[in-house]
């Protein structure tokens, strides 16, 4: 995870900071020479944390329902992360060697490709599903733990309401920090994800506005109508 974040930081500097100090001609040459390779690393550093989120959520559920289980021990977690990194690299590198490499353009903020590979299409279309599903699963797990804690408390615990309230505040603050971290990483710190979310939101708003306009026009009477 640390290596992935470090790669993401370097790629963001290369893709979004260095071009500010280059001429369009120099950037065009650099993009043609290195753009496909840096975009490949960018895709890996973006996809790996997202796929790793699924493993993290699975580990949380397993620890809650099987506290003494060893399916997610430290050594096995390292092994899972290694397999996931290999899978992510293969997933990203297949379109690259299939004649459909992706190249990021700083001036248009788009990822361009000469053809559309099936892996690229599926990831671009459904990559927003993973964070949302993981978020709702985390919320469900938090609510489940909260209900269990309430049932386990007895009426004799009223004298320690202040420490219990402080513990609940700390507990929910930690969970809120997780959601804030996802927001900062996938929305604020990742331009590609931010653009996808804003574009989808704009499409939904435009669709709703068009639907409202059609409904108003269908209700309005024509001039001279009885």
Image (tube, rainbow, N blue to C red):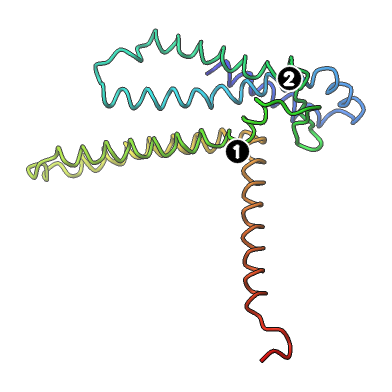
From the viewer's perspective, tell me whether residue 104 is left or right of residue 25. Answer: left
Quadrant housing residue 125: top right
Residue 207 horizontal side relative to residue 142, left or right = right
Q: Across the whole image, how many numbered discs are drawn on residues?
A: 2
Q: Do the residues bearing badges 1 and 2 touch, measured as CB atoms within 8 Å?
A: no
Image coordinates of residue 138 in percent, x first then y, are: 39, 35
- Determine the secondary structure under disc 1: helix
User: Between tags 1 and 2, which lies in front?
Assistant: 2
Q: Position of residue 2 (x, y in %)?
A: 54, 17
How far is the residue under mark 1 from the one under mark 2? 21 Å
Tell me if mark 2 has few (under 14), some (14-19) or many (20+) residues whose alpha carbon lies within 10 angstroms of its own.
many
Q: Is residue 226 above or below residue 25?
A: below
Residue pushed farthest right? 25
Name the residue furthest left: 156
Residue 81 location in percent, x, y?
48, 14
Is 146 placed left or right of 222 in the picture? left
Q: Nearer the viewer, residue 146 or 136?
A: 136
> Which label number is shown at residue 103?
none
- Towards the viewer: 220 or 107: 220
Outermost residue on the front side: it is 226
**Left or right: where 104 falls relative to 124:** right
Mark 1 or mark 2, earlier in chain:
2
Q: Quadrant of residue 66?
A: top left
**Mark 1: few, some, or many residues within 10 Å (few <14, many ≥20)?**
few
* Residue 38 disc label: 2
Q: Is residue 226 above or below residue 122?
A: below
Taking the spot 41% from the left edge, 13% from the top edge, the residue there is 77
Q: Quadrant of residue 79?
A: top left
Q: Position of residue 108 (x, y in %)?
A: 80, 38
User: Which residue is label 1 attached to?
Assistant: 188
SS at mark 2 in the image: helix
- For the point 39% across and 7% down, which residue is it? 75
């Amino acid at each position: 995870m640390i290596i992935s974040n470090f790669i993401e930081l370097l790629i963001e500097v290369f893709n979004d900071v260095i071009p500010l100090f280059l001429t369009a001609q120099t950037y065009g040459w650099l993009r043609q020479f290195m753009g496909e390779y840096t975009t490949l690393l960018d895709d890996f550093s973006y996809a790996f944390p997202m796929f790793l989120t699924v493993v993290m959520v699975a580990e949380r559920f397993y620890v809650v329902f099987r506290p003494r289980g060893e399916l997610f021990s430290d050594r096995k977690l390292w092994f899972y992360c290694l397999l996931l990194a290999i899978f992510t690299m293969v997933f990203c590198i297949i379109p690259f060697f299939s004649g459909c490499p992706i190249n990021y353009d700083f001036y248009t903020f788009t990822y361009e490709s000469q053809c559309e590979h099936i892996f690229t299409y599926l990831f671009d279309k459904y990559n927003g599903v993973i964070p949302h599903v993981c978020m709702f699963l985390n919320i469900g797990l938090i609510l489940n733990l909260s209900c269990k804690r309430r049932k386990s408390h007895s009426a004799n615990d009223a004298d320690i309401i202040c420490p219990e309230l402080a513990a609940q505040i700390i507990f929910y603050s930690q969970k809120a920090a997780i959601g804030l971290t996802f927001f900062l990483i996938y929305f604020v710190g990742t331009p590609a994800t931010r653009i996808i979310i804003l574009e989808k939101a704009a499409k939904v708003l435009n669709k709703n506005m068009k639907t409202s306009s059609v409904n108003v026009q269908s209700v309005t009477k024509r001039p001279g109508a009885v």
